[in-house]
Image (cartoon, rainbow, N blue to C red):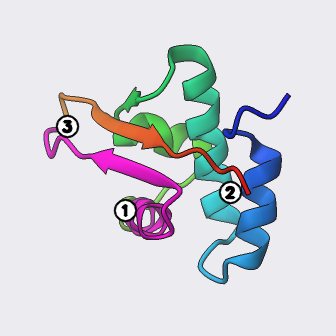
Amino acid sequence: MDDGFSILTFLELAGEDPRMGPSHISLFAALLYLRQKEGNPVLAYAAELRRLSKVTSKRMYFQIMRDLKDGNYIRIKPSYNPAVRSEIYLRRLDK
């Protein structure tokens, strides 16, 4: 069942979006995983998302998050505090 938040829909859209690469897919999959467990918004630490997605570089992580935000896949309220989780809202990806 596709509720507008599926990896399949994201892969279809990402395949047409030149900004999206394997690391974007990995990070979005990690967000979907946490959404499944916790709901929307996802409350997560950057370090937790980097670990789940295997994105080791902090700089790359922030670039990927910016690309996902600019591509309208997510909306984020960053905490700017490593002890406070950021709020990440996954947008419905209905075609």
- The answer to whether residue 2 is magenta is no
Question: What's the residue type where badge 3 is placed?
Answer: Pro
Q: Secondary structure at mark 3?
A: loop
Badge 2 crowding class, 10 Å Cα cut-off, few under 14, some 14 to 19, many 20 or more, is some
**Does 14 appear above or below 47?**
below
Q: Quadrant of residue 59?
A: bottom left
Q: Secondary structure at mark 1?
A: helix
What label sits on residue 25 in the rendered view?
2
- Horizontal arrangement in the rendering, residue 45 relative to residue 18 (left or right): left
Label 3 close to label 1 by CB (< 8 Å): no
Label 2 close to label 1 by CB (< 8 Å): no
Residue 39 x, y percent position in the rendering: 51, 20
Q: Nearer the viewer, residue 54 or 3?
A: 3
Q: Quadrant of residue 17?
A: bottom right
What label sits on residue 27 in the rendered view?
none
Quadrant in which the N terminus appears: top right
Residue at position x 42%, y 61% in the image: 69
**Does 38 appear above or below 12?**
above
Q: Which residue in the protein does label 3 denote? A: 82
Going from the N terminus, do you reach mark 2 or mark 1 first? 2
Determine the CA span between mark 2 and mark 3. Answer: 24 Å
- The answer to whether residue 62 is magenta is yes
Please identify the residue farthest to the left as the structure is shown: 81
Q: Which residue in the protein does label 1 denote? A: 62
- Read off the magenta span: 60-81
Going from the N terminus, do you reach mark 3 or mark 1 first? 1
Question: What's the residue type where badge 1 is placed?
Answer: Phe
